[in-house]
Amino acid sequence: MEVQMNLTIKQQLGIKIRDAVKQAVVEGIFPDDLLIPEVQVESPKTSDFGDFATNIAFSLTKILKKSPRDIAIIIAKYLEQEKIIKKIEVAGAGFINFWIAEARLYEILGEIEIKQERYGSSNAGQGKKTIVEFLSANPTGPLHVGHGRGAVIGDVIGNILEFCGYDVTREYYINDVGNQMVKLGASLRVRYLELLGESLPLPEEGYQGEYMIDIAKKLYELEKDSCRNKDVMYFKDFAMSEILEDIKQSLLSFGVNFNSWYAESTLYQEEMTKKVLDKLKDMGYTYDANGALWLKTTAFGDDKDRVLIRENQIPTYFTGDIAYHCSKYNRGYEILIDLWGADHHGYINRLKAACLALNYPEESLVILLYQLVSLSRGNQPVSMSTRQGEFVTLSEVIQEVGKDAARFFFCMRKSDAHLDFDLELSKRQSQENPVYYVQYAHARICSIFRKAKESGLKIKSYEEIDLSVLNLSEELILLSKMSTLQDEVSGCARLFEPHRLTIYLMEIVSIFHSYYNHQRIISSESNLTDARLFLINGLRIVLRNTLSLLGISAPEEM
RNA sequence: GCGUCCGUAGCUCAAUGGAUAGAGCGAUGGACUUCGAAUCCACAGGUUGGAGGUUCGAAUCCUCUCGGACGCACCA
């Protein structure tokens, strides 16, 4: 069998199953006009049900008016001779279970040897220009733990899409315009004047956090008392650039890399906002009422119309956001992915409505939500108000539990589920955190190779090794699991669900640990040793590639 | 009041509409003279909040209901 470079085993099976159904049609066993449903090939939950399984018979029962079991038997008959299938079985009410031929499983190792760090990648995205906008936390304070979740999910989605062949930009939208920024400047001004001996009250809803005092001290060190008469805008600019610098630093230590920072103020400088407003007016989707300018978002599925320009003639945040999304389209992006905290969900319809009004294709804008993180320390809830300055910063958490553990933790959960981050628990369990379970497997494999090297063993190439000695069920299960990496990654990309990768890792690593505890990799049988070393080297690459998508290190020693 | 999301083992969470609902933590009992015990093995733990419905089949979809989180601005 030649090394199959393009299709995964799962994909191959899907095609063969479809062909089998077609063949049954050709031979008149199934009716000519049969509409073949999409073939679903799944990894069964237990290996008793084989390497893969399909439920195709169930989806045909209604059309064919036969029992699923009878249909399964018919289809299975056409697949018996397939070379990649070792054993086929009709089970349960009509599942078809497949065991894959060893020779096909061994090819996985050949494919890994060739592809190395690209193993698991694909070209599903066909280079489509994609922009993932995430985090976009207001530059009014340091990032807190809650931000960590959005940062990691966005970052990993970016990695996954890239690995699937999309041309990805990660962008941070900086809200540097508006009332809150004025309050930020005013708050700094008060803190600065305090240092000069003038005591003033903080502004209403000002920023009370201690970091503002630090920033004031820094300003004082640089400028002494020369800013006494500067206006609020001056203080705003200083505070914002300090805070942004701090945010960038936190992200760097968290392994999150944005390659684009887009300031809201740019939209006004480039008159994007005005252009968009004109366009919406020309299209007849706006009207005046109560002294304000409104957009008829209700015509596109929103609950109520929304204000574009307030009575005081200042555009709303919404207007800026429409212009911002136009700018993404204008910059040539075909797929726009926005990742928002779930507290913004009420905003979705409004933005989608605006993009529809401007004739952008509906499916090109994907808005993803992640549920907020509630923080607790033991049973005590911890407040996370930026304004009042009570929060645990992301940097502190990274320092306490480590980048890898924090990233893994945030990725373990489905993003639309609430997440309770218990600081006590995460610290207490830090040594037993699942991330170590995965990393330990990688380190263990590396350790075996150090041992092998000491004994003068080398990794031979795919061509040189007799892999047929790998015939234990654990070895075959491991291989079949390794074969699904690309399927897993593209599933994550399709559904925007990065947490599947952590689950994949846990599953495959648990097979490995068990295997390791029961079998010796390096033994006196040299053929077996060569083959097993080659097997775990392939696994090492699978682990490394998956961890790298998650932005988690794959240590050689721990 | 309206809307969105969530409710699964003691705890934190998995499970494309599929087979006997699974992991980890925690509890209990075992496994290092041998490639790393951050591991493995065994055992226990459930009316998937509740009630109806849809169908070959529901934790998943629909309706109602109970609990929780978050939204419902001419704030950002």
Image: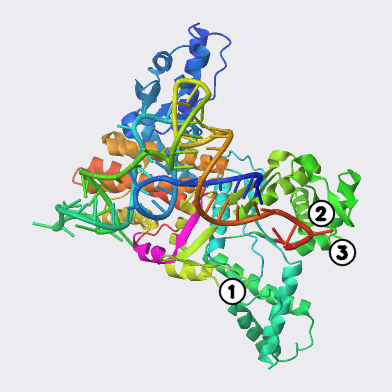
Whole-angstrom CA distance, mark 1 to mark 2, is: 32 Å
- Horizontal relation, residue A270 to residue A149: left or right: right
Disc 3 is placed on an element classified as loop
Q: The N terminus of chain A is located in which quarter?
A: top left
- The image quadrant that residue A53 belongs to is top left
Q: Residues within 10 Å of mark 1 (few under 14, many from 20)?
A: some
Amino acid type at image mark 1 = Gly
What residue is pinned by disc 2?
A: A307
Amino acid type at image mark 3 = Asn
Find residue A359 and report its horizontal and vertical position in percent: 80, 40
What segment is highlighted magenta in the picture?
Answer: A417-432
Q: Chain of mark 2?
A: A
What residue is pinned by disc 1?
A: A389
Find residue A438 and report its horizontal and vertical position in percent: 37, 53
Q: Residues within 10 Å of mark 2 (few under 14, many from 20)?
A: many
Disc 2 is placed on an element classified as strand
Q: Chain of mark 3?
A: A
Residue A149 in sight: yes
Instruction: Write the residue at 59% across / 79% down.
Output: A210
Find residue A446 and report its horizontal and vertical position in percent: 33, 55
Instruction: Write the residue at 66% across / 68% down.
Output: A139
Q: Is A498 situated above or below B51? A: below
Q: Looking at the picture, do discs 3 and 2 lie on one chain? A: yes
Whole-angstrom CA distance, mark 1 to mark 3, is: 31 Å
What residue is pinned by disc 3?
A: A312
Q: Looking at the picture, do discs 1 and 2 lie on one chain? A: yes
Q: The C terminus of chain A is located in which quarter?
A: bottom left
Residue A359 in sight: no
- Horizontal relation, residue A129 to residue A87: left or right: right
Amino acid type at image mark 2 = Val
